[in-house]
Image: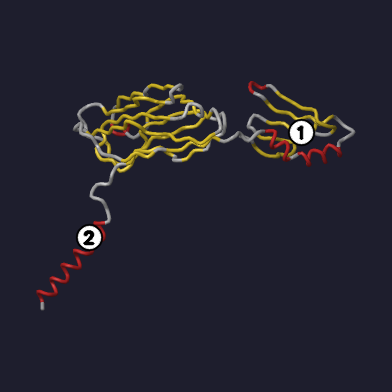
Amino acid sequence: MGTNRRNIYAIALGLFLAIVFGALPAGAMPIVGIQPPLLTPALGGFFDVYVEISSVTDLYAFQFDIRFDPAILSAIGVSEGSFLMFGGSTFFIPGSIDNTEGTVSFTADALEGVIGGMSGGGTLAVLQFQALAVGSIPIDLLNVKLLDSSADNIPFSPEGGTINAVPEFSTMFILAANLILLIGLSQKFRKRSPLLLYRVMPRGRIRKWTIAKGIGIEENDHRSLFIRYGRKSFKSVGRIR
């Protein structure tokens, strides 16, 4: 009876351990991926793409290439991520940008000295892009290599990303959305100065349009639109990109 009970306890314990630990991989496969996986920059806008790693053990060095559509994006630069830097001195190679072929080649980083590699997850590198045209395209990771402190390859799973460049939300759309309000206000002030639409351009220049009699709209340095009458801005009507 006692032997049977012990056997039952042993079987139950074995099942419990199998359920708890069997569901977890002995060593989770590291993932090297683009973050965020989906970006929606505005046309003409600048933005960052992060190459990140997770669940890695003893990462000492890495390299990768990036491929993109040069008709939609232009690569601006590559900077070192913080992950390996937490492990000590590093030797970083930003790689070579080719906006004709749509590649960033041989971006690499390595720890220096006889030390152990980094474990866990973080940012390997940050790439800066500009959206040149509207469209949805993939960002692909190619030729990725991970090395541990013994110069052995670390297996991994790559994950690319998607860039969905969208039209910029134009100032003129905001002006159109407030057209009825402007017409009403212009009627109120129709006996005064003409309705002027002001837009602050780069380097402090101001663009204005005369629409009707009444008040106007301007865009300040903080990219906010205000209804303007004379020299006084007295009502915010929205923000633009």
Total of numbered circles in the picture?
Answer: 2
Report whether 61 appears left or right of 124.
left
x, y (%) of residue 60? 25, 32
Give x and y (percent) for residue 16. 23, 64
Work out whether residue 20 or residue 99 is closer to the camera in this orientation and state it: 99
Q: What amino acid does circle 1 point to? A: Arg
- Mark 1 nearby-residue class (10 Å; few <14, some 14–19, many ≥20): many
The answer to which image quadrant residue 66 occupies is top left
Q: Which part of the image, by quadrant, shows the C terminus?
A: top right
Sort mark 2 into few (<14), some (14-19) or many (20+) by Cα contacts within 10 Å: few
> Residue 188 got which mark?
none
Where disc 2 sits, the SS reads helix
Residue 81, given in percent of the width and then of the height, sits at 37, 32
Mark in front: 1 vs 2: 2
Mark linked to residue 228: 1
Q: Could you tell which of marks 1 and 2 lies nearer the N-terminus?
A: 2
Q: Which residue lies furthest to the bottom in this view?
A: 1
Label 1 residue SS: strand
Establish if 12 lies above or below 134: below
Q: Residue 18 carries which label?
A: 2
Residue displayed at 75% across by 37% down: 234
Q: Is residue 34 left or right of residue 229?
A: left
Q: Residue furthest right?
A: 191
Residue at image coords 25%, 61%:
19
- Label 2 amino acid? Ala
Q: Where is residue 63 in the image (x, y as percent from the top left)?
A: 31, 29
* Displayed quadrant of residue 148: top left
**Could you give the CA–CA distance between mark 1 and mark 2, rounded to whole angstroms?**
71 Å
